[in-house]
């Protein structure tokens, strides 16, 4: 289920940025991870973390004081704002917060 965007305060040093952000759906996260992953003929897997972060931020940030969050804006960020924005990006390979044992219990109850 899609949730409505929510207002957050992003604190960067002494500055507070008022943002409206939306959740990143599980399927979209998987699509972005897939687009950022390449496989070589040698069997190596390469992940483009920079592209992953930018794509997630462009999706998640609905409103910001700087206007549209796009590639041009993101490549101009200073370290402090960039590091703060990165906190909005979920780890590409971390398991979801779903408690698998609880799911198993719920499904066996029926």
Image: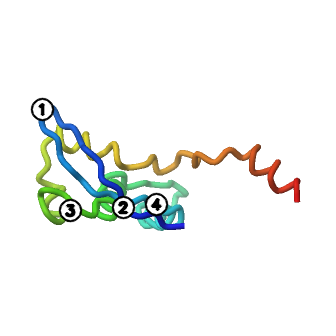
Indicate which disc, 4 or 1, sits on the residue closer to the N terminus. 1
Residue sitting at 88 percent across and 60 percent down?
110
Q: Position of residue 95 (x, y in %)?
A: 58, 47
Q: Marks 2 and 3: in contact by CB < 8 Å?
A: no
Q: Position of residue 68 (x, y in %)?
A: 17, 66
Location of mark 2 (residue): 5
Tag in front: 4 or 1? 1
In terms of depth relative to the viewer, which is nearer, 93 or 99? 99
Tag in front: 2 or 4? 2
Q: Residue 33 carries which label?
A: 4
CA gap, disc 4 and disc 1: 33 Å
CA gap, disc 3 and disc 4: 19 Å
Location of mark 1 (residue): 14
CA gap, disc 1 and disc 2: 25 Å
Indicate which disc, 3 or 2, sits on the residue closer to the N terminus. 2
Location of mark 3 (residue): 69
Residue sitting at 24 percent across and 43 percent down?
10
CA gap, disc 1 and disc 3: 21 Å
User: Left of 76 or right of it: where is 49?
Assistant: right
Residue sitting at 20 percent across and 65 percent down?
70
CA gap, disc 2 and disc 4: 22 Å
CA gap, disc 3 and disc 2: 15 Å
User: Left of 64 or right of it: where is 27?
Assistant: right
Indicate which disc, 3 or 4, sits on the residue closer to the N terminus. 4
In terms of depth relative to the viewer, which is nearer, 2 or 53? 2
Q: Residues within 10 Å of mark 4 (few under 14, many from 20)?
A: many
Q: Which mark is residue 27?
A: none
Q: Quadrant of the N terminus?
A: bottom right
Indicate which disc, 1 or 3, sits on the residue closer to the N terminus. 1
Q: Position of residue 51 (x, y in %)?
A: 32, 58
């Amino acid at each position: 289920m899609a949730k409505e965007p929510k207002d957050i305060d992003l604190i960067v040093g002494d500055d507070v940025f008022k943002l409206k952000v939306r959740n990143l759906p599980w399927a979209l996260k998987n699509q972005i991870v897939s687009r950022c992953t390449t496989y070589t003929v040698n069997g190596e897997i390469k992940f483009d973390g920079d592209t992953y972060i930018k794509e997630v931020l462009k999706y998640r940030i609905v409103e910001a004081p700087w206007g549209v969050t796009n590639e041009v804006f993101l490549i101009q960020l200073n370290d402090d704002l960039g590091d703060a924005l990165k906190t909005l990006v979920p780890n590409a390979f971390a398991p979801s917060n779903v408690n698998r044992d609880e799911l198993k219990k719920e499904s066996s109850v029926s």
